[in-house]
C-alpha cells in the first residue's frame, strides 16, 4: 500500500492547512474501501498495477486537491475578454511599433548599421532580449491592472451598472463619416489656396522673427505636395457626395497615403532648410541653427515611416475587407 | 446535489453513498462527491461524524433539518421542471 500512501501524501501537499487531516482521512477511507471491494470481487489482493490503475482513474493529486480549494482566479470570466482585447491593443500599438523602430534604427542609422554588420549576432540577441523585457513590463502591467479591477469588480460589481442609452451608435464600416470628409475637404482646400501663395518662393517668413530659405530642391516638393493636395480635395469632395467606400476610392486613398508618406520622408531627409535669417543673430549661430533643424528633421524620418506604415496599413486593411465583401454598404443605406 | 441530498435521507458514509448512486444509475466520481459533501456540510444542510464501522473509522453523513427543508424545495422545483418539459414534449409530439 506504499503507492496509496504516496498518493495521499501528494494530495495532502496541496490541501488547505486547516482541513488537510480531515480530507486525507476521508479520501484514505474511500480509497481503501474501493481497493478492498475490488479485491473481494477478484478473490485476491490487488497487484501494484491494479492499484496504480485505481489511482490513475482518481486523477493527478494536485487536481484532486484542487476540488477542495475555493475556486479563485486572477482575472475572472467577466473581465477576461476585455483583458485580452487590451492586450491586443497594447501589442499592436506599442510592442509592434517598438520592434519596427528598433529594426528601422538598425537599418537606417549609419552608425548602428555599421555596428550591426560587424556584430549582428550580438545586436539581434540584445534586440530579442530588449523586446521580451519590454513586452513583459507592458503586458505584466496590463495583467496587474486587470487583477486589481477583478478584485474591485468582486466587491463593487461596477460592470453590472450600465445604461442602454449610453451604448454607441450602430457602426457602418462602409460609411465614410461626413464629419471627417468635411474636415478633410476644408483642410485640403485651405492648403490648396494657402500653399501656392505662401510657399512658392522657397522662402518662409515667420513675421519679424525669422526668414527660412529652402534648398534648390524645394520646387520638386512644392509641386508634388500641391498635386497631392489637389487630388485629396477631389477625393474629399467625392466622399462628401457619396460617403461610402468603393474599391477604386480605397486604392486611390492607399496610393495617396503612400505617396504622401514617401514625400514627407524624403522632405525630412532632404536637408531642405538652406539657411535661417534671424535679426540680431550671428551668421555662425544661424548656420548652427540651420544644421540643427536639418538634423532633427532627419531624425524624425523613423517616426514618419512608422506613421506612414500605420496609415498605409489601415488603407490596405480596408481594401482587403472590400475585396472579401466585408465592407459593403447595405442596400438600405444606398437607397438614402 | 438533489440526488446526494435525497440519498442522504438515510445516513451513509461517502463510499457507500457513491456505490448507492452508481447502483441507481447516477455515476459520480469521488473527486466531485467529497468536495460537494463538504460544501453542503459547510452550508448547514448536512452533518457528519466519524464512527468506527467494520474495524475502520468512517465518516457518516446525514441530512440536517435545513437539509431536509432544502431537499423538499428542490424536489418541488424538479417536479415543476419535469412537468414543464413533459408539456413541451407533448405539444411537439402533437
Image (cartoon, rainbow, N blue to C red):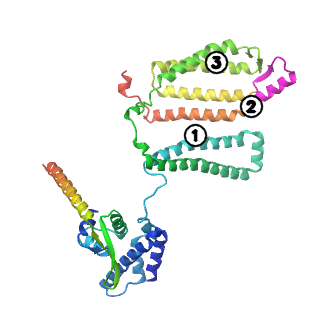
Residue A243 position (above or below residue B67): above
**In this orientation, which residue lies closer to the viewer: A29 or A256?**
A29
Picture coordinates of residue B59, whole percent (x, y): 33, 75
Mark 1 or mark 2, which has the lower sequence index? 1
Is label 1 or label 3 in front? 1
The secondary element bearing badge 3 is classed as helix
Q: Which residue is disc 2 drawn over?
A: A296
**Label 3 belongs to which residue?**
A226
Point out the image quarter for the N terminus of chain A.
Answer: bottom left
Q: Is residue A294 rendered magenta in the image?
A: yes
Looking at the rendered structure, the secondary structure element under dot 2 is helix
Residue A167: where, in percent of width, then height?
Answer: 41, 34
Chain identifier of the residue bearing label 3 in the image: A
Q: Write down the region rendered in magenta.
A: A271-298
In this orientation, which residue lies closer to the viewer: B2 or A61?
Answer: B2
- Residue under pointer 1: A93
Q: Position of residue B8 (x, y in %)?
A: 26, 69
User: Mark 1 or mark 3: which comes first in sequence?
Assistant: 1
Amino acid at each position: 500500500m506504499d503507492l496509496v500512501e504516496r498518493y495521499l501524501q501528494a494530495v495532502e501537499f496541496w490541501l488547505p492547512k486547516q482541513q488537510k487531516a480531515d480530507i486525507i482521512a476521508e479520501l484514505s477511507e474511500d480509497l481503501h474501501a474501493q481497493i478492498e471491494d475490488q479485491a473481494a470481487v477478484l478473490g485476491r489482493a490487488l497487484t501494484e498495477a491494479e492499484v496504480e490503475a485505481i489511482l490513475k482513474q482518481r486523477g493527478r493529486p494536485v487536481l484532486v486537491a484542487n476540488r477542495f480549494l475555493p475556486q479563485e482566479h486572477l482575472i475572472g470570466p467577466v473581465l477576461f475578454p476585455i483583458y485580452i482585447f487590451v492586450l491586443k491593443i497594447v501589442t499592436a500599438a506599442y510592442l509592434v511599433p517598438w520592434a519596427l523602430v528598433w529594426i528601422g534604427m538598425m537599418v537606417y542609422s549609419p552608425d548602428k548599421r555599421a555596428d550591426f554588420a560587424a556584430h549582428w549576432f550580438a545586436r539581434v540577441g540584445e534586440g530579442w532580449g530588449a523586446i521580451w523585457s519590454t513586452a513583459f513590463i507592458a503586458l505584466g502591467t496590463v495583467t496587474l491592472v486587470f487583477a486589481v479591477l477583478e478584485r474591485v469588480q468582486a466587491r463593487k460589481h461596477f460592470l453590472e451598472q450600465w445604461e442602454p442609452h449610453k451604448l454607441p451608435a450602430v457602426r457602418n464600416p462602409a460609411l465614410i463619416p461626413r464629419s471627417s470628409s468635411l474636415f478633410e475637404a476644408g483642410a485640403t482646400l485651405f492648403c490648396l489656396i494657402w500653399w501656392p501663395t505662401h510657399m512658392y518662393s522657397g522662402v518662409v517668413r515667420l513675421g519679424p522673427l525669422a526668414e527660412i530659405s529652402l534648398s534648390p530642391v524645394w520646387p520638386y516638393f512644392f509641386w508634388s505636395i500641391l498635386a497631392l493636395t489637389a487630388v485629396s480635395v477631389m477625393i474629399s469632395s467625392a466622399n462628401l457626395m457619396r460617403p461610402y467606400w468603393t474599391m477604386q476610392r480605397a486604392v486611390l486613398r492607399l496610393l495617396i497615403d503612400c505617396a504622401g508618406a514617401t514625400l514627407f520622408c524624403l522632405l525630412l531627409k532632404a536637408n531642405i532648410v538652406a539657411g535661417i535669417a534671424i535679426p540680431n543673430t550671428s551668421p555662425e549661430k544661424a548656420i548652427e541653427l540651420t544644421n540643427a533643424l536639418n538634423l532633427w528633421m532627419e531624425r524624425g524620418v523613423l517616426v514618419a515611416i512608422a506613421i506612414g506604415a500605420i496609415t498605409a496599413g489601415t488603407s490596405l486593411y480596408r481594401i482587403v475587407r472590400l475585396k472579401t465583401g466585408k465592407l459593403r454598404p447595405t442596400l438600405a443605406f444606398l437607397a438614402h | 446535489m438533489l440526488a446526494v441530498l435525497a440519498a442522504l435521507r438515510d445516513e451513509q458514509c461517502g463510499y457507500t453513498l457513491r456505490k448507492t448512486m452508481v447502483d441507481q444509475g447516477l455515476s459520480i466520481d469521488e473527486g466531485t462527491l467529497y468536495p460537494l459533501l463538504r460544501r453542503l456540510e459547510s452550508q448547514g444542510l448536512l452533518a457528519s461524524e466519524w464512527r468506527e464501522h467494520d474495524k475502520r473509522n468512517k465518516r457518516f453523513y446525514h441530512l440536517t433539518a435545513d437539509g431536509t427543508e432544502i431537499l423538499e424545495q428542490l424536489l418541488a422545483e424538479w417536479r415543476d421542471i419535469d412537468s414543464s418539459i413533459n408539456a413541451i414534449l407533448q405539444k411537439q409530439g402533437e
